[in-house]
Image (tube, grey):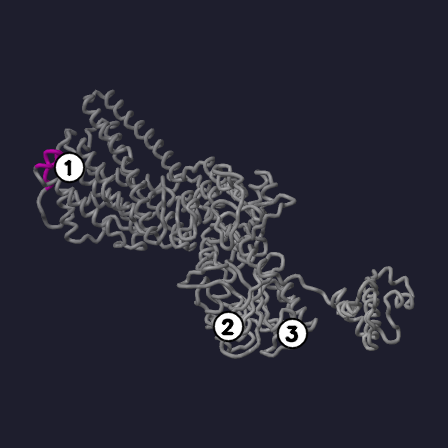
């Protein structure tokens, strides 16, 4: 420097003795000294030059500006002035403050903290946490400086101050809300309670009337009491709880084979009357696995990506030709996918992803293209990690295979990545990035965003300020396989499917359209609107809304309550802690088995083991079938009970001897509650059941149609049995073993025919299949053999007071047999579904012989 040279010259000044003597300088040294002094003056002058604000400079003449800035208007600045001003003021360029020192980058790794809060908020993307105070309140998704118990740290480390434990934590808030909710009684439980009370009152009323009438007629009180007790045993449907339980258990077992766990038996049937299914989006309707679905290259090529999840299953197809692309068969698509795979920290091994979901989606995309190993072709030298402020990440790499200059790969938000780009890729050739090309890319980014996709822009190049724009990648948490079909089938069968999610509106609507919710005609409502609406007003609106977005656990609970208030039977599906309260308060809570939290599984009534939403279809079908089987059993049991009660009542009122003794009534009760009745509960589900609309929860088991069928069956049994009783009664109207045996056998045979017609409420036996329920056939055969044993085995004859009904004979249409056939005509017409000639029935010889045995 000039100052250094000038000081060297000063050292030549020498002192000698007691006086001061100066050493003379040489001529060259003197000139140097003068020049050095001038340079020092010039440096000081340059230091006085300061920038002038534009508003002040605009008021000055150019001569005044030149004088103030020491500028020669003819020659400009000297090289010396330029050098000095650069030393003082720096270069004429902007200094980007994005390149952080190494120590700062290392520190950011400890502080860059990402937490997966999907179990609370429903958001698939991890939330970035800071220690900056928030100025205003908000919902759970906006609390960026709070970390909740029960969530998962995905990246980074952090320290925090515990602000609440136990019930005072956010997790505890959900727990308290769950504790406050009571699981509602199922419609089946309510119907069975009501039916049991009705049958008990009716039965005891009739039995009391019979005993009182017999006592007035002077019959023996003990005999009437014995008959009354027997009728009470026969009339009260003690087999009904058994049948209901067995039917539900078998339904539960069938559901278990379909990978659905039912925790409470009555819940299976409740699905049969469910008319609204509210479903969480993330992890239920979707796989909670980010997946690339669309690509747009910088030169305008569009491609679609198939396959879901973190694996290589799926293809990348160019549109509209549907050409499958592999590796670099299309250079533009290949470079785009390469950049996404290299600028990446996620890994996928054995279909398990480690890292951030978005980066996992990019690795899965590379696997589908056959480029999963492309990352090994580069050696990473430096990484600029992603931050919420800069909204991009980049890596600097060198090629392992060729001696090429280093290359940067960048991915991030479009508006940030495009700032670093000066070129765009056109079929592998970099071209200048024009305003028109930039506008095209921006338009594509907005289009993909409107579809609910998370859009990433990618670029590569030798320097961060000289990157080549490669294109856009659209990522979404896609619908699960089979969900669209399940929603379609459920909607056709009368169920309304509603989606409740914590996601933004665009994402929620995109998923709703993809799964065919309300045939694409979606109406949405935000969590804030739910919060501000009154419960009565909300009950009127919720039925018309198909998508609820930005919801919290309180909002979900309020939605469920509003639907129930409007009269709906609500099933709620979910997998997170934020779904637990709604799962418990719903009529049917359905949790996911794989991705579901322990809290959601505990609160739910059913668990889908494979997280398969379409399994709900099977559960609904099973629920409808179970209720139909219960109705079939009730029809058979009540028609038998009414027949037995009416038979004894009429004989008592007409002052006739009892057609059945106490032991015979108990045997009929065994048949009524035994194998034939129980086998009606295992009738296979009708194939058309799912297409029927959900049953109204207000509908009782004993509806008008069922009562008419019960009375018709009972009338047939009573008329046929009374006819045989009257025909076989001696002239002195005394009850004999033969009379009761004939009446008893006739009643049992009619009842077995009645059981056959009770297998379906709407279809004929020929339609549902005679051999479809083999358990029923075996039970009927066993009952027939049991009846024969009661009639012909001597030890049982003594117990039941029966006698042999004659020997085998030729079929001649005996009066007794004819009477049986005449009485059976009405029942057989119901069984066959067409009119049958009363006396022209084709009777096989074996059946004729059997009837001869029965009628003597």
Q: Of 697 and 537, which appears nearest the observer? A: 537
Q: Quadrant of the image for the C terminus?
A: top left
Image check: 192 left or right of 222? Answer: right
Q: Tell me how far mark 1 sits from mark 3, CA to CA.
A: 103 Å
For the residues carrying marks 2 and 3, which lies nearer the camera in this image?
Answer: 2
Residue 174, given in percent of the width and then of the height, sits at 49, 40
Q: Is residue 636 above or below residue 71?
A: above
The residue tagged 3 is 423
Residue 397, given in percent of the width and then of the height, sits at 54, 71
* Residue sitting at x 62%, y 45%: 133
Q: Tell me how far mark 2 sits from mark 1, CA to CA.
A: 96 Å
The residue tagged 2 is 378
Quarter assignment of residue 735: top left
Circle 2 crowding by C-alpha within 10 Å: few under 14, some 14–19, many from 20: some
Residue 8, given in percent of the width and then of the height, sits at 76, 69
Q: Of 820 and 492, which appears nearest the observer? A: 492
* Numbered circle sitting on residue 741: 1
Circle 3 crowding by C-alpha within 10 Å: few under 14, some 14–19, many from 20: many
Q: Of 418 and 584, which appears nearest the observer? A: 418
Image check: 240 left or right of 26? Answer: left
Q: Is residue 233 above or below residue 418?
A: above
Image check: 653 left or right of 73? Answer: left
Query: Is residue 15 highlighted in magenta?
Result: no
Which range is magenta?
795-805
Which label's residue is closer to the chain start, 2 or 3? Answer: 2
Q: Is residue 46 above or below residue 632?
A: below
**Quick check: can you spot residue 84?**
no
Query: Total label count?
Result: 3
Quarter assignment of residue 405: bottom right
Q: Tell me how far mark 2 sits from mark 3, CA to CA.
A: 22 Å
* Residue sitting at x 82%, y 66%: 46
């Amino acid at each position: 420097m000039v100052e250094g040279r000038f000081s060297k010259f000063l050292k030549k000044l020498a002192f000698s003795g007691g006086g001061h003597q100066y050493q003379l300088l040489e001529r060259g040294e003197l000139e140097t000294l003068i020049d050095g002094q001038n340079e020092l003056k010039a440096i000081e002058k340059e230091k006085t030059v300061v920038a002038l604000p534009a508003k002040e400079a605009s008021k000055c003449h150019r001569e005044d500006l030149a004088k103030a800035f020491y500028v020669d208007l003819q020659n400009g600045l000297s090289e010396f002035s330029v050098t000095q001003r650069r030393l003082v003021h720096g270069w004429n360029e902007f200094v980007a403050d994005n390149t952080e020192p190494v120590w700062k980058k290392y520190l950011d790794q400890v502080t860059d903290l990402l937490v997966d809060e999907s179990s609370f908020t429903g958001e698939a993307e991890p939330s970035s946490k800071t220690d900056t105070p928030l100025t205003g309140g908000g919902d759970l998704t906006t609390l960026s400086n709070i970390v909740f118990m029960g969530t998962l740290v995905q990246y980074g480390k952090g320290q925090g101050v515990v602000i609440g434990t136990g019930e005072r934590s956010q997790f505890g808030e959900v727990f308290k809300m769950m504790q406050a909710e009571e699981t509602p009684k199922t419609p089946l439980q309510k119907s069975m309670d009501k039916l049991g009370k009705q049958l008990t009152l009716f039965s005891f009323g009739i039995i009391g009337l019979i005993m009182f009438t017999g006592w007035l007629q002077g019959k023996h009180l003990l005999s009437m009491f014995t008959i009354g007790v027997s009728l009470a045993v026969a009339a009260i449907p003690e087999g009904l709880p058994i049948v209901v339980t067995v039917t539900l258990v078998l339904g539960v077992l069938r559901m278990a084979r379909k990978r659905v766990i039912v925790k409470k038996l009555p819940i299976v049937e409740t699905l049969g009357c469910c008319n609204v299914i509210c479903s969480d989006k993330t992890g239920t309707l979707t796989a909670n696995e980010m997946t690339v679905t669309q690509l747009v290259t910088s030169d305008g090529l569009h491609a679609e990506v198939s396959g879901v999840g973190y694996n290589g299953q799926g293809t990348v197809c160019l549109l509209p030709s549907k050409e499958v692309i592999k590796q670099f068969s299309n250079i533009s698509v290949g470079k785009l996918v390469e950049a996404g795979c290299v600028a990446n920290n996620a890994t996928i091994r054995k279909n398990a992803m480690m890292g951030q979901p978005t980066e996992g989606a990019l690795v899965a995309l590379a696997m589908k293209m056959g480029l999963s190993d492309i990352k090994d072709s580069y050696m990473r030298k430096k990484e600029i990690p992603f931050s919420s402020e800069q909204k991009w990440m980049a890596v600097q790499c060198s090629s392992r295979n060729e001696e090429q200059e280093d290359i940067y790969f960048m991915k991030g938000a479009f508006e940030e990545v495009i700032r670093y780009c000066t070129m765009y890729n056109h079929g592998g050739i970099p071209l200048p990035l024009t305003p028109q090309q930039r506008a095209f890319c921006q338009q594509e980014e907005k289009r993909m965003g409107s579809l609910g996709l998370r859009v990433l822009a990618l670029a590569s190049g030798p320097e961060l300020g000289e990157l080549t724009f490669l294109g856009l990648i659209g990522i979404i948490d896609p619908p699960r396989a089979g969900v669209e079909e399940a929603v379609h089938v459920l909607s056709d069968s009368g169920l309304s499917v509603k989606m409740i999610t914590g996601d933004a509106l665009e994402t929620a609507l995109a998923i709703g359209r993809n799964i065919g919710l309300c045939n694409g005609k979606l109406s949405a409502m935000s969590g804030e609107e739910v919060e501000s609406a009154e419960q009565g007003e909300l009950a009127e609106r919720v039925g018309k809304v198909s998508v609820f977005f930005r919801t919290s656990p309180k909002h979900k609970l309020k939605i469920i309550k509003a639907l129930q208030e409007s009269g709906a039977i609500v099933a709620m599906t979910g997998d997170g802690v934020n779904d637990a309260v709604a799962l418990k308060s719903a009529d049917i809570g359905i949790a996911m088995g794989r991705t579901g939290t322990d809290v959601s599984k505990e609160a739910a009534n059913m668990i889908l083991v494979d997280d398969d939403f379409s399994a709900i279809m099977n559960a609904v079908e099973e629920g409808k079938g179970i209720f139909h089987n219960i109705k079939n059993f009730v029809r058979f049991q009540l028609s038998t009970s009414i027949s037995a009660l009416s038979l004894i009542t009429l004989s008592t009122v007409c002052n006739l001897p009892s057609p059945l003794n106490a032991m015979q009534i108990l045997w009929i009760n065994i048949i009524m509650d035994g194998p034939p009745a129980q086998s009606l509960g295992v009738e296979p589900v009708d194939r058309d059941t799912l297409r029927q609309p959900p049953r109204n929860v207000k509908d009782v088991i004993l509806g008008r149609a069922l009562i008419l069928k019960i009375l018709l069956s009972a009338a047939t049994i009573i008329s046929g049995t009374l006819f045989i009783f009257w025909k076989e009664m001696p002239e002195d109207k005394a009850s004999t073993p033969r009379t009761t045996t004939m009446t008893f056998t006739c009643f049992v045979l009619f009842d077995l025919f009645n059981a056959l017609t009770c297998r379906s409420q709407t279809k004929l036996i020929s339609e549902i299949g005679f051999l479809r329920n083999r358990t029923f056939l075996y039970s009927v055969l066993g009952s027939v053999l049991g009846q024969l044993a009661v009639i012909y085995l001597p030890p049982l004859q003594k117990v039941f007071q029966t006698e042999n009904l004659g020997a085998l004979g030729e079929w001649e249409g005996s009066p007794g047999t004819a009477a049986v056939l005449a009485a059976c005509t009405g029942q057989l017409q119901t069984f066959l579904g067409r009119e049958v000639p009363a006396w022209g029935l084709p009777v096989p010889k074996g059946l004729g012989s059997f009837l001869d045995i029965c009628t003597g």
